[in-house]
């Protein structure tokens, strides 16, 4: 049976191989984490929670939401948007890093779950946004998040 090589390995051993991007090999892993307490209900389909800012050239490799009990039967998606000088966010891709993630039980919920999610590299500074999908997020729910990304 013949062995198989990944695209990265093939590129690394090729004669005169181009330099591998730092987001693919040798880049720095950085982490951003925080908590957020909803101060009012977040409406499914029309509102978002802006979690943090990521720099241009960031490749998200892991995104987790730590969900408490009491969120209900909601699901969520994680994406990004651009922002202006005042910090106002315009959502560009509301499910870049995951869609339909079940939040109905207290646990750590993983968002970057398929290869396509992990292949995207930001081309400018972006704001990371969390959106409820099926039902609203209630008032006074504290979420925690941890996002790991690779850059330079």
Image (spheres, grey):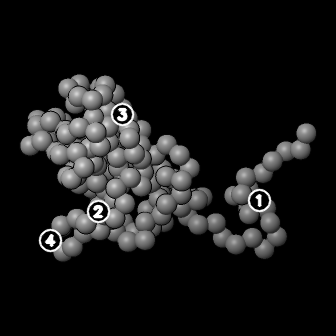
Alpha carbons under labels 2 and 4: distance apart: 15 Å
- Residue on which the image places disc 1: 10
User: At which x and y percent is residue 12?
Assistant: 73, 62
Q: Is residue 78 left or right of residue 21?
A: left
The local crowd at label 2, few if under 14, some if 14 to 19, many if 20 or more residues have their Cα within 10 Å, is some
Task: Give the camera-side residue of 129 and 10.
Answer: 129
> Marks 3 and 1, how far apart in space?
37 Å
126 or 72: nearer the viewer: 72
Tag 1, which secondary structure? helix
Q: Closer to the N terminus: mark 3 or mark 1?
A: 1
Residue found 38% across the figure and 38% down from its top = 101
**Which of the labelled discs sits on residue 85, or is there none?**
none
Name which of mark 2 and mark 3 comes first in the sequence. 2
Q: Which residue is mark 3?
A: 102
Which of pointers 4 and 1 lies earlier in the amino acid sequence?
1
Badge nearest the viewer, 4 or 1: 4
Using the image, tell me which numbered label, if any, was put on residue 91.
Answer: 2
Closest to the observer, 74 or 5? 74
Of mark 2 and mark 4, the one earlier in the sequence is 4
Mark 2–mark 1 Cα distance, whole angstroms, equals 37 Å
Report the Cα–Cα distance between label 2 and label 3: 21 Å
Point 34% across, 68% down: residue: 125
Q: Which residue is mark 4?
A: 86
Residue 80, above or below 107: below
Does residue 116 sit above or below 102 in this rendering? Answer: below
Image coordinates for residue 118, horizontal then vertical, percent: 51, 53
């Amino acid at each position: 049976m013949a062995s198989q090589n990944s695209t990265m390995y093939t590129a690394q051993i090729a004669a005169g191989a181009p330099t591998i991007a730092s987001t693919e090999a040798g880049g720095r892993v950085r982490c951003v984490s925080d908590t957020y307490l909803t101060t009012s209900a977040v409406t499914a389909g029309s509102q978002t929670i802006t979690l943090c800012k990521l720099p241009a050239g960031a490749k998200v490799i892991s995104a987790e939401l730590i969900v408490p009990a009491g969120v209900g039967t909601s699901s969520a998606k994680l994406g990004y948007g651009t922002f202006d000088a005042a910090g106002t966010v315009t959502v560009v891709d509301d499910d870049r890093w995951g869609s339909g993630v079940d939040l109905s039980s207290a646990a750590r919920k993983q968002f970057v779950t398929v290869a396509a999610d992990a292949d995207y590299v930001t081309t400018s500074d972006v704001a990371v946004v969390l959106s409820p999908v099926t039902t609203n997020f209630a008032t006074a729910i504290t979420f925690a998040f941890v996002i790991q990304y690779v850059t330079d």
